Amino acid sequence: MDPKILMPLKSRFVTREVGDELVLVPLTGNVSQMKELFTMNGTGRIIWESISEDCTMDGLVLKIKEVFDVTDEQAKADLEAFLTKMYQLMA
């Protein structure tokens, strides 16, 4: 999976911090759709905020490992699970 594919998806959401969580609010045009909200856990938040035009799977795995002190395998599994869920939103 290429995380850069999520760049267009990022423009379809506005983010808000609520307590310790990052909440994504879907946008349609310029009007927010308040009937759907997505709450990011810590790992999701790090991934979401790190997605950019030049991000790579390896770079995101390293970022997750730095922040959460987990193994390569756990970081990769968390990243793949997150990307799978986000790809489903794009479908």
Image (cartoon, rainbow, N blue to C red):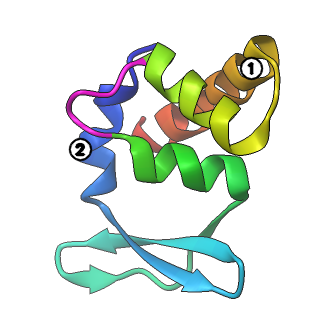
Q: Which residue is mark 1?
A: 77
Quarter occupied by residue 2: top left
Dominant SS in magenta: loop
Q: Which residue is mark 2?
A: 8
Q: Which callout, 2 or 1, points to the residue nearer the camera? A: 1
Between 5 and 22, the one lying in front of the other is 22
Q: CA distance from mark 2 to mark 1?
A: 23 Å
Under tag 1, what secondary structure? helix
Q: Which residue is at 35% across, 37% downward?
A: 6
Q: Which residue is at 65% across, 36% downward?
A: 66
Q: How many labels, in total?
A: 2
Q: Which stretch did the figure color magenta? A: 52-56
Identify the disc placed on residue 9.
none
Under tag 2, what secondary structure? helix
Side of 76 relative to 50 (left or right)? right
Q: Which residue is at 26% across, 85% downward?
A: 31
Q: Position of residue 44 (x, y in %)?
A: 63, 49
